[in-house]
Image (cartoon, rainbow, N blue to C red):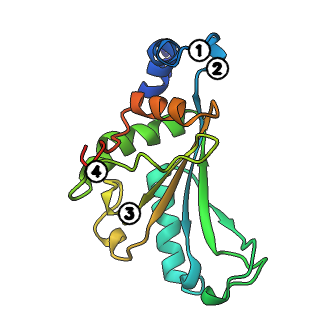
Amino acid sequence: MAKATAITAPRLKALYATTYTKELQAELELGNVNEVPKLEKIVVSVGIGKNKDDKRHYEVVKNTLIKITGQQPVDRMAKKSIAGFKIRAGMNRVGINVTLRGARMYEFLDRLVNVALPRVRDFHGVSATAFDRDGNYNLGIVEQSIFPELTFEETQVAHGIQITFVISGKSKAGSRALLEKFGMPFEKEGGRR
């Protein structure tokens, strides 16, 4: 008879459920535990733009997203025409993205904060002003080489990555407090961490 192995929750998800929820409720002075900001999803996307006809570039971008997220990316169509990039509305493959939820989302966040971001050269923290009015946070990464999942050969065609953290709670202060609990290294006032 084989032993059943228990599936453990990702580290950050367990910490959020046991510790961070209570701490955030007290810090933000919220009356109900359901008002505490919660990370709903992480969207990792790459715009292909002017390289839309280059099949090698597309394959490199697709392979990058598969390796760093562990999920199959989805092609995106152009919503509007942009003459400078020779893109027309409805044109396919102008970008690809992955939406992470659940365990994969927390594991990606853990790797991003604790492994990838510290590898950025001359890193002084991420921007503290990249929140939208709903409290979602956007992080742009200039080059994919900070992810240890990628080999040197896979980083020869450099491209940027856009990471969007969709957070419930609808306030910038609450969203920032949540991301700080998860270990997001925001830059201090004056540009230094």
Q: Secondary structure at mark 4?
A: loop
Disc 2 secondary structure class: helix
Q: Quadrant of the C terminus?
A: top left
In the picture of the structure, the residue carrying the numbered disc 4 is 191
Q: Which mark is residue 35?
A: 2
Determine which of the numbered discs, if any, sits on residue 144 in the image. 3
Using the rendered view, name the quadrant where residue 88 is placed: bottom right
Q: Name the one closer to the observer, 162 or 55.
A: 162
- From this viewpoint, which residue is outermost toward the front? 190
Which of the 4 image quarters holds residue 81?
bottom right
Of helix, strand and loop, which one carries label 1? loop
SS class, disc 3: helix
Give the camera-side residue of 133 and 34.
133
CA–CA distance in space, label 4 to label 3: 23 Å
Q: Is residue 48 left or right of residue 19?
A: right
Around disc 2, counting alpha carbons within 10 Å, would you say few (fewer than 14), some (14 to 19), or many (20 or more)? some
